Amino acid sequence: MSNTKLASIAPSRINDDTLRKFLGYHLKRSFNVIQADLSETLKPFDLRMLTFTALVFIVDNPGLSQSQLADAMDIERPNLVIIIDELEQRELIVRDRVQTDRRMYALRATLAGKRLCKKAVAADKAHELRLLAGLDNETKANLMSALEALSHHLQNRTESHNS
């Protein structure tokens, strides 16, 4: 068969019916849209999703250690150092040595960090309201509950599997 004939039989619409039977496929497609919109939402604050997440954790948990933050964000500690350095260089957070363990740092937000975090969280809330505007409150609550249950189930499964 020639290349011309092959090209003429290509589907006009990509069939993803098989993939649509998988939860992971729906989660990934939804995440892609949410992530792209959130990236645009956070641009005016010069934050990325990871720097935003780290800043929120630090604001909400003053004195958090870097290892606790890495665990909470589920990222490798060396990757976290880059994020912490960026936030510190922007004077949004400070690292204080822990008196009882000089190898550890306690992270805390500066006033500028708290202010930026408050604005970015408000923008994130608006972003979610905009994206989910087509869903009623009950559907949103059910979705959140289902995702929390899934996350809890998978976390327990991972922990018992690693034991």
Image: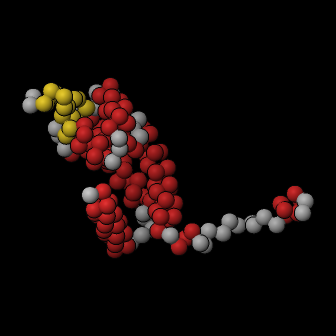
User: Going by the picture, which residue comes out furthest to the front?
Assistant: 163
Query: Is 61 on the left or on the right of 30, as rendered?
Result: left
Q: Is residue 3 above or below residue 20?
A: above
The N terminus, quarter of image: bottom right
Q: Is residue 163 above or below residue 73?
A: below
Image location of residue 85, percent across then percent down: 33, 28
Which residue appears at 82% of the width and 66% of the height?
9
Image location of residue 79, percent across then percent down: 37, 36
- Residue 114 visible in this rendered orientation of the protein: no
Which residue appears at 33% of the width and 48% of the height?
74
- Res 89 → quadrant: top left
Task: Depth check: give the residue in front, 67 or 142.
Answer: 67
Which residue appears at 44% of the width and 39% of the height?
43
- Res 2 → quadrant: bottom right
Image location of residue 72, percent across then percent down: 27, 48
The C terminus, quarter of image: bottom left
Image location of residue 158, percent across then percent down: 32, 59
Query: Is 7 on the left or on the right of 153, as rendered?
Result: right
Query: Is 36 on the left or on the right of 64, as rendered?
Result: right
Which residue appears at 19% of the width and 40% of the height?
64
Task: Depth check: give the residue in front, 79 or 116.
Answer: 79
